């Protein structure tokens, strides 16, 4: 269930310590555009899940911050402060990071991206709890069509070495929702 703060819906955000992100700053800038949030890459797909979308269209912009390594930055990023300009409404794949939604062996799964330093700091129980919260708050609210639209992105996201945290139910096969 979304929380509401001063009238603005705030969806689940995995609480990575701000001090760690401040020293890391790896998120929101990409050497590989295929690792950018799905909302950057989705283009105009009618019915793409709102939770995985951004409040405005996103793109990647050249980023001169690191001249030695070609980087592109998400247009939602305020570069001086390195903060998301619509934090709290940012896409689910950003909000649950370092959990990643992947499609592996015929199932949607949440895995842990070992590239994020916090992945080796947070406990197994913590990440499991966060994954279960995403499952209850957002995953189970998706329609079969929305899951079908997510599947190609989740397939492309999978890297075999990323450790599984939770296997999500594929509600496309559920008889419990006659509207599906
Ligand atoms: S990679 Fe992890 S620690 Fe680094 S900025 Fe992103 S969420 Fe924060
Ligand atoms: S949407 Fe926000 S959190 Fe996600 S990559 Fe862009 S700036 Fe970062």
Image: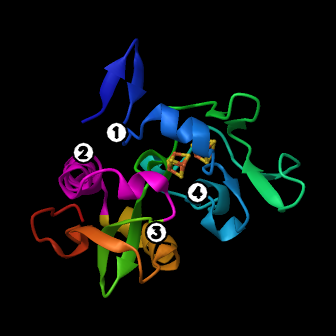
Question: Which residue bears the numbered disc 2?
Answer: 137
Q: Nearer the viewer, mark 3 or mark 4?
A: 4
Q: The N terminus lies in which quarter of the figure?
A: top left
Mark 3 and mark 1: Cα distance apart in space: 21 Å
Residue 49 shows in this picture: no
Neighbourhood count class around disc 1 (C-alpha, 10 Å): few under 14, some 14–19, many 20 upward: some
* Residue toward you, 57 or 85: 85
Disc assigned to residue 120: none
Neighbourhood count class around disc 2 (C-alpha, 10 Å): few under 14, some 14–19, many 20 upward: some
Question: Which residue bears the numbered disc 1?
Answer: 12
Which mark sits nearer the N-terminus, 4 or 1? Answer: 1
Q: Nearer the viewer, mark 3 or mark 2?
A: 2
Neighbourhood count class around disc 4 (C-alpha, 10 Å): few under 14, some 14–19, many 20 upward: many
Q: Which residues are magenta?
A: 115-143
Residue 123 falls left or right of residue 174:
right
Q: Nearer the viewer, mark 2 or mark 4?
A: 4
Question: Which residue bears the numbered disc 4?
Answer: 37
Mark 4 and mark 1: Cα distance apart in space: 16 Å
């Amino acid at each position: 269930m979304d929380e509401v703060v001063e009238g603005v819906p705030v969806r689940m955000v995995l609480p990575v310590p701000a001090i760690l992100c401040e020293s890391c700053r790896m998120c929101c800038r990409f050497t590989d555009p295929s690792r950018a949030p799905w909302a950057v890459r989705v283009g105009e797909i009618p019915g793409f899940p709102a939770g995985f979308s951004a409040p405005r269209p996103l793109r990647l912009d050249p980023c001169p911050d690191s001249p030695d390594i070609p980087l592109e930055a998400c247009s939602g990023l305020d570069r001086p402060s390195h903060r998301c300009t619509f934090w709290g409404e940012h896409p689910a794949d950003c909000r649950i990071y370092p959990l990643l939604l992947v499609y592996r062996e015929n199932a949607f799964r949440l895995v842990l991206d070992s590239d994020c330093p916090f992945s080796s700091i947070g406990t197994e129980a913590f990440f499991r709890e966060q994954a279960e919260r995403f499952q209850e708050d957002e995953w189970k609210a998706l329609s079969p069509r929305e899951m079908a639209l997510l599947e190609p992105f989740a397939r492309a996201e999978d890297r075999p070495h990323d450790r599984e945290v939770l296997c999500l139910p594929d509600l496309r096969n559920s008889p419990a929702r006659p509207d599906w």
